[in-house]
Each structure stands twice: as structure tokens, then as C-alpha cells.
Amino acid sequence: MASIRLRYQQSKGASDNQAEGRISIQITHKSRTRTINTGYGLLPDEWDRRRERPVIPDDPSRFATVAACRETIMLDLSRIKRIITVLEASSPDYTVDEIFDAYRIFMLDYSLFSFMTSQISLLRHRRRMRTAETYVAALRSFSRFRGGRDIMLDALTQEVVIGYEDYLRDRGLTPNTTSFYMRILRAVYNRAVERGGIEQKSPFRKVYTGVDHTRKRALPLVDIRRISRLSLASTPHLEYARDIFMLSFYMRGMSLIDMAYLRKSDLRDGYVAYRRRKTGQKLCVAWTHEMQSIVDKYPSATSPYLLPVFRSGGSDSYAAYRNVSYRINRSLKQISVMIGSRSAITLYCARHSWASIAQTKNIPISVISAGMGHASESTTRIYLASLDTSVVDRANSVIIKSVF
């Protein structure tokens, strides 16, 4: 079996104890040796040559440096031992070069920054753009916490995670926002565990990863009526935002990303069939004259899309979608002032409002959940198996009629 030793090499020409020596890891197997430089340096009196490890320094100002060096070295030794164990089990004739190469690959693949970047690329490839955006936001936040310094995933300890949570709280972030970042990092960590790259050490056990109840973003029916009845012909950008908002509401709170990519071919036999980009769940919505009247206001013979989100001749890229979303939400804020709403209206309010108004109409929770496509909820999964879509369509009809 391969042997591992730590080596300390004092700086050449150094005649005192004020020059740092370099520490390396020496791996020997089958009479061949490879050396890994740790990148750390310690003073001669901070190194125990007999026991081959760092020692606590007399100078308190050096304690943090020595402690960090010791922790990193112990992690490196643990990684190499794990690699050797795997090679012993899978390839008894392994060489010292294979140990060295496996270590280098691990250090490249399983740093948090590089592994998270690869996950973001994978999400984009799968066209899960919104999820990719949240991962980018989490990565940037954690990078700011670390001062731009990367960290290996197996070095993501409870202490590091708790320190990150404290960092977020000190900046005034709400529990839901800190939990949002923690859940993303935990998902990335668990994915690395699933791939066999690191061992599960549950570093997120002592931080908050739940979801607090927040102020409802649902609008009352009276506000929905006011929005639908606004005379906005003289302000096309506001009329357009209002129409998209009402379309989302009429279509059971359909998200803008799902509306944007609906194609004309998705409308057949009085129904629009689509898959939610967030969950992949297939949904059908009965097409009504209220929906058609809005679509008729924005005709396009050349566009393949059903709804007026991407303009004719414009780009249908995700960047274009984000720009449209920003402009719509900015216009909706103006509309919220026009109707005297106490809070700013966004497109997401349409989804909350549909669910809230449905509940006031005594529509069963199971029907509401099915209509919104909450496939991830256990109660929704139970009812979706046997729920006839006509029940949801009748519920949607009741809600749309109540607006007029």
C-alpha cells in the first residue's frame, strides 16, 4: 500500500528562524515517489520534524496562520488516503501517478466555486434558466463572504456555514433570504456527495433552511377588477403590462416564462397544453374568450408564439425574456399607484391572487393546487392522480366571470 509523509524544506540560504520553509506531501508507492506542494509555509520553530506536523507557535500573531496550515494539511492527507482506499478496492495495480492525478482532478472538480459553476452550466444546458440565476446569485453572495477565496467542498464545515449565515444576517437579510442561499448551497453540497466526490458531514444542520410565512402578495378581487377595467389606450406600455398580468391571472397564475414560450401549436381543441419550466409538469388550460380578446390585440402572422411576450421580429432569448419581465413589472408598479393599491404589484401577484380568490369562492384546495401545477406538494400528488381537468376548468371559469 502507498505511504504518505509530510516534508518540511527550509528556505535556501536562510540562517535564522525568520524565513518560512515550505511544506509538501510525499506519496510513495512501488518504489516511485510523487510530491504535492501544499502552498503553505511555516517558520522552523512552528514545525515538529520528529512528528512531521505543525506545532502551536509562541507568537500569538502567528496562531491563525499555523492553525489554517494544519487544518489544510489534515484535509489533504484525508483526501489522499480516501483516494488510495478507492484505488485499492477498484484497481489493485494502481500507480503513484494515478494517486497524484486523482488528487489533482479532485482539487479541480470539487472546489465550491468550480463545482457550482459546472452545476450552473448544466442548468442552463437543460434550459432551467431561472434556477441557474438563483445559483449564480448564491455563488456571488458566498464569494463576497469569502473575499473571493475559493474553498473545497469537503472543507465546508458547520463553522464555515454558520459564519456565512451570520454574515448574511449582519447585512440585514431576512430569514427567508438567508435560508434561500443556504438551501442552494446545501443542494450543491449534496450533489457532490451523490457523485461520490466527498463524504456527507451535514454541515447545514445548525443553520436555518426553512421558509417563514411572509406577507401575502395576493390582490383582492376588487383590485383585479380595477386593473382589468383601466382605460390605458393612451399609454401602450401600461396597457401591455396590464394585459400580460390579466392573461397570467386568467390562465391560473401561469408564470411569464411559461407564457413567453407558448407556441401557437400548443393551442388545440379549445385548450392550451404546456409543461411548466420549473417542474416539468404538464398542464392544460381551457382557452376562453377573455384570453382570446387579449391575444387579438397583439396579432403577429410571423411569430410562432401564442402570446405577445416576445415581440414580432425580436429576440426570443432568455435575456430578452428578462428584459420584458423587468419592463412589465416596472409598468405594473405604476398601475398599482393608479388603482390605489397599498403595495407594489408584480406579475407574481397574479398567481397569488388566483389562488387566494379561488379559496374565497370555496374551491377545494386540491383543485387550486392542481390548477396551479403544484406537483411538488404531497396533497397535490394525491389528487392529481384522479382529478378530472374539467373540474379545474370550471373553477377557472368561475374566477374569470367574477372579474366582470
Image: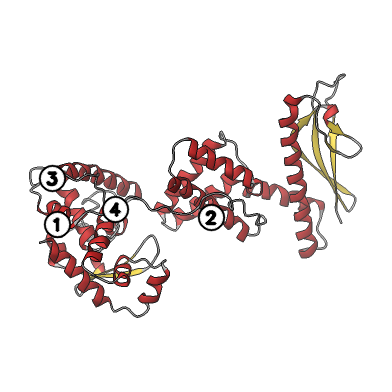
Between 107 and 66, the residue placed more toward the observer is: 66
Where is the N terminus found, in terms of image quarters? bottom right
**Residue 287 seen in render:** no
Per the rendering, the mark at residue 170 is none
Few, some or many C-alpha atoms within 10 Å of disc 3 (few <14, some 14-19, many ≥20)?
few
Residue receiving disc 3 = 236
Label 3 element class: helix
Few, some or many C-alpha atoms within 10 Å of disc 4 (few <14, some 14-19, many ≥20)?
some
Residue receiving disc 1 = 299
Q: Do the residues labelled 1 and 4 touch (CB within 8 Å)?
A: no
Between 309 and 243, the residue placed more toward the observer is: 243
Spatial separation of the CA atoms under disc 1 and disc 4: 25 Å
Closest to the camera, between mark 3 and mark 4, is: 4
User: Could you tell me how many numbered marks the image carries?
Assistant: 4
Few, some or many C-alpha atoms within 10 Å of disc 1 (few <14, some 14-19, many ≥20)?
few
Q: Which of marks 3 and 1 is nearer the N terminus?
A: 3
Q: Do the residues labelled 3 and 4 touch (CB within 8 Å)?
A: no
The three-letter code of the residue at mark 1 reads Pro
The three-letter code of the residue at mark 2 reads Ala
Spatial separation of the CA atoms under disc 2 and disc 3: 43 Å
Spatial separation of the CA atoms under disc 3 and disc 4: 21 Å
**Residue 239 seen in render:** yes
Few, some or many C-alpha atoms within 10 Å of disc 2 (few <14, some 14-19, many ≥20)?
few
- Residue 42: give x, y in percent of width and height: 79, 29
- Residue 340: give x, y in percent of width and height: 16, 44
Where is the C terminus found, in terms of image quarters? bottom left
The three-letter code of the residue at mark 4 reads Tyr
